Amino acid sequence: MRSIDLIRRSGRSLLSAKTRTVLTVFAIAVGAFALTLTLGASNGAQQYADTIIKDNFDPTALIVSSDGALFGGADTSKPQAYNPNSGSITAPSGATRQVKLLSDGDISRLKQVPGVASVEPAIALSLQYLTRDGQKKYEATATAYDDYSAPSLLAGSIPTNVPSGSVILPEGFVSALGFSSPQDAIGKTIRVSVSKQFDQASVLSSLLSGDPSKAGAALRIPSNSQETSLQVIAVSKKPATLLQASSGLYLRLSSQDIIKLNDFTTANTNSYHKYLSASVKVKDGTDSAKLAAAQDKIKKLGYGAQSVVDTQKTITQVIGVLGGIVTVFGVIAIIASVFGVVNTMYISVLQRTREIGLMKALGMHKKDINKLFLFEAGLIGLLGGVVGSVLAFAAGVLLNPVISKQLSLGGVKLLDFKLGEIVMLVIVLMIIAILAGLFPARKASKLDPIQALRTE
């Protein structure tokens, strides 16, 4: 018997038991829905992570620290030797750990590494306040302008080399500082203030020595704040991506200005001319081999070095773990639906015993009867996969604009479905359903036609 005829007969058999078929199809559809959403979310998260990395990290540069501790390479189970260049970092969880800081000597040493084009210390400076004449004072953070992660502008322009005394103002401060529009802010002057840090180590040492007067002397800092006037040359647009490194409220200054302000705040402290990390730009860094060679040389010198590829791998691993957790629930639903398929097909065999006996009596081969029930199981898997995937796709189309608006994702879709993956999922579900139907199909093909025709 031709396969096409067997498929048609399988379809008619399923239609004759609509309720049972629909229930089994929806059991598979639940798993298909969950797995399709998981695939879409994984693709969307990966696309989002790629967008963040593309917008914020120079692929030709390495992030370099004094050792591997910044990138999680330190063994925290063992005591670490004292290092005067150590500083502390605090994780989002609140945990604090010591890491070695880069010094001017390290910066000079890195510049001498073959293949390195330039080295810039990473500085993010918390300002005491930001203001302008007649306006309130606001908290703000400043960082050096980076050619690679150049922001989208609402007004003004950025020269090749940002001149000292200028600033790129974030959109969020325009109305707060009393400007009528981004264009109105261009050429106007704002003021930023920074305050000096006190030497925490000296204060603590003085207190432990039992002489509070020394601690008081360490805290008495002449002229502990400084105001600097800056001219607005451009207004940056609020970043579309939620995890943009510049967060939308970072002022961008020239490298000279950010270093000068940072030096003022850290003067006479252990943090003076010490940096958590530095950006090391590699000559011809677009060549992955040259980038990797420079990274190896830097690591051999005892520094920690991470490329964009390394960062991408870390994020991909996190996304993979989260996707795996969600996938487990979809797989559980699929496993449950397998028993539904077995049950449906087994009941179908019992109810159609006389029909099977008649088909055999009329000359139908065992293999054709076996195929008939396997096709029925496959059709159930196909319908379940299609229904679940279509529902997941429809949910994605409806939810994507809402999610993008709520999380400010811009043009990035958090649920990104790929046709090839959905087709493969449906095929896999068909195969699983066919495997689930093997036992009932085998039972049907082995029925004795005489015994089957006698069945009431």
Image (cartoon, helix red, strand yellow):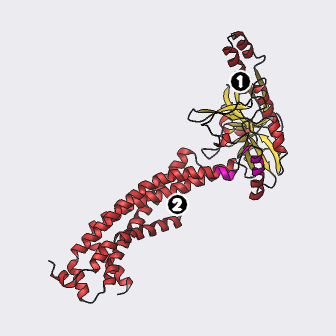
Q: Position of residue 56 (x, y in %)?
A: 69, 47
- Residue 314's place in the image compared with 168, above or below, is below
Residue 182 on image: x %, y %: 71, 39
Which amino acid is tagged 1?
A: Gly
**Where is mark 2, residue-wise?**
417
Along the line of sight, which residue is nearer the eye, 411 or 177?
A: 411
On the question of residue 229 being in view, the answer is no
Q: Is residue 215 visible?
A: yes
Q: Residue 77, image x and y in percent?
A: 59, 37
Sequence-first tag of 1 and 2 = 1
The C terminus, quarter of image = bottom left
Q: Viewer-proximal residue, 206 or 81?
A: 81
Q: Amino acid at mark 2?
A: Phe
Q: The residue tagged with tag 1: helix, strand or loop?
A: loop
Give left or right: position of 304 versus 349. Answer: right
As displayed, is residue 236 above or below residue 29? above
The one nearer the camera, 263 or 391, is 263
Alpha carbon separation for disc pair 1 and 2: 52 Å
Q: Quadrant of residue 369?
A: bottom left
Magenta residues?
295-311
Residue located beneath label 1 in the image: 134
